[in-house]
């Protein structure tokens, strides 16, 4: 799966090509790198990239897709734009209002699980729905903390693309 990562004004396409435990071969744009990544504590990682050692601290932002990445002498604001978000942003231009409060199906599929009910409190990054589409299961996570106001589909339903499945306030 290709994920876009935005740092400052630059957006790069990142893909894990191969992974065996903590050893990875990743592609960033057109270049391939060997990465050895180990989690050494909560939000703290040690990375060996092309023979150079880096210590990283990741601080999750309020919507679960934004991070602050601290290194020994630098700090970066990073935004993760996964395929689901990219698809949703492209589809929502001129359609439903793009909102962190709406969980929207990016394409037709079958609703496998509804993990919350109306009135439940959810936290940022909490999985609220699982949809199967094109032989893949996708977890949909709350982008904001709040209360589930409305659920517009039930487990087992076939859902249309660009349909608001859940509203969180």
Image (spheres, helix red, strand yellow):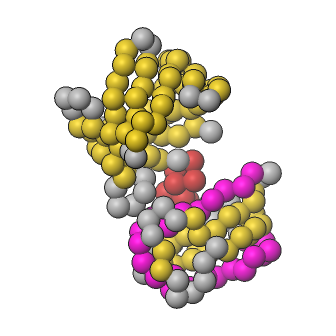
Quarter holding the N terminus? top right
Q: Is residue 44 magenta?
A: no
Give above or below for 159 relative to 79.
below
**With 73 as the anchor, is 133 left or right in this view?**
right
The residue shown at (70%, 63%) is 131
Tell me where the magenta segment starts and ends, as one range.
Answer: 136-159
Quarter holding the C terminus? bottom left
Residue 153, horizontal then vertical, whole percent? 69, 80
Residue 129, horizontal then vertical, whole percent? 64, 68
Give above or below for 94 relative to 149.
above
Residue 92 visible: no
**With 81 as the anchor, is 10 left or right in this view?**
left
Give whichever of 71, 103 is nearer the camera: 71
**With 31 as the anchor, is 162 left or right in this view?**
right
Give above or below for 148 relative to 158.
below
Q: Is residue 144 magenta?
A: yes
Residue 8, horizontal then vertical, whole percent? 28, 39
């Amino acid at each position: 799966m290709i994920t876009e990562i935005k740092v400052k004004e630059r957006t790069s396409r990142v893909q894990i090509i191969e992974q065996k435990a903590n050893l990875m071969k990743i592609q960033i744009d057109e270049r391939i790198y060997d990465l050895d990544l180990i989690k050494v504590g909560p939000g703290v990682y040690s990375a060996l990239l092309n023979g150079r050692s880096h210590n990283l601290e990741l601080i999750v932002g309020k919507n679960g897709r934004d991070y602050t990445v601290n290194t020994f002498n630098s700090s970066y604001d990073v935004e993760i734009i996964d395929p689901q978000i990219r698809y949703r942003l492209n589809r929502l231009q001129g359609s439903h209002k793009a909102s962190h409060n709406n969980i929207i199906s990016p394409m037709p599929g079958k609703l496998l699980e509804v993990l919350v009910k109306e009135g439940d409190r959810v936290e940022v990054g909490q999985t609220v729905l699982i949809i199967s589409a094109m032989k893949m299961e996708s977890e949909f996570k709350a982008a904001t903390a709040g209360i589930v106001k409305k659920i517009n589909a039930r487990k087992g339903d076939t859902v249309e693309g660009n349909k608001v499945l859940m509203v969180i306030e």
